[in-house]
């Protein structure tokens, strides 16, 4: 097994939001859920889903309904390793409505991403967002 250097580990964790952005852009609930650990959790305002199956089902319905045609964006604002295989990432971003290039204030969020390394791969153990303002 190859061990990644500290900068490479940082890049691997920082890539998780990009994986979510890509899955959202494709409205691919399977790819979205695959970013999480099997028992990962996702908390959004008014929503709590635990496990890839629940996350996949929720996002599948959301992409076909209220999130249809939307995109999501986010940028890391803090990243800290809490141990060799645990990292806390904080981002700022939100949902872009069709035709938008900047997130409207009412959809802007800050999010916490708890990443864990399992079998050499970084995955989300927990994701939570709340309104930015």
Image (cartoon, rainbow, N blue to C red):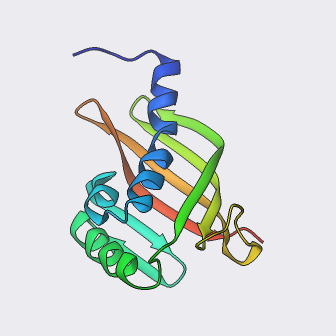
* Quadrant of image for the N terminus: top left
Assign the C terminus to one quadrant of the image: bottom right
Of 52 and 62, which appears nearest the observer? 62
Taking the view exactly as shown, the residue that stands out farthest to the front is 99
Expressed as whole percent of the image width and height from the top left, the position of residue 12 reads 44, 32
Q: Is residue 38 above or below residue 9?
A: below
Q: Residue at x 38, y 56 (%)?
A: 23
The answer to whether residue 79 is left or right of residue 63 is right
Q: Would residue 87 be found to the left or right of residue 57 on screen?
A: right
**Is residue 36 left or right of 80 when viewed as pictured?**
left
Which quadrant of the structure image shows residue 63? bottom left
Instruction: Please say if 121 is above or below 93.
Output: above
Instruction: Give percent across and percent down for residue 37.
Output: 28, 52
Q: Position of residue 117 (x, y in %)?
A: 34, 36
Image spot of residue 2 (x, y percent): 27, 14
In the picture, measured across the screen, residue 7 lies left or right of residue 57, that is right
Quadrant housing residue 38? bottom left
* Residue at x 65% of width, y 59% of height: 93
* Residue that appears at 47% across and 37% down: 13
Q: Quadrant of residue 4?
A: top left
Instruction: Name which residue lies at 50% across and 52% down.
Output: 113
Instruction: Examine the rendered structure and indicate whether residue 80 appears above or below residue 59.
Output: above
């Amino acid at each position: 097994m190859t061990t990644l250097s500290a900068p490479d580990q940082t890049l691997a964790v920082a890539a998780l939001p990009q994986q979510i952005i890509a899955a959202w852009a494709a409205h691919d609930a399977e790819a979205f859920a695959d970013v999480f650990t099997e028992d990962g959790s996702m908390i959004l305002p008014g929503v709590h889903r635990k496990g890839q199956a629940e996350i996949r089902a929720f996002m599948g319905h959301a992409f076909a309904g209220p999130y249809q045609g939307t995109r999501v964006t986010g940028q890391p604002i803090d990243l800290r390793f809490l141990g060799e295989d645990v990292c806390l990432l904080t981002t700022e971003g939100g949902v872009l409505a069709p035709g938008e290039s900047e997130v409207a204030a009412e959809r802007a969020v800050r999010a916490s991403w708890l990443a864990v390394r399992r079998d050499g791969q970084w995955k989300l153990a927990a994701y939570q967002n709340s309104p930015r303002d």
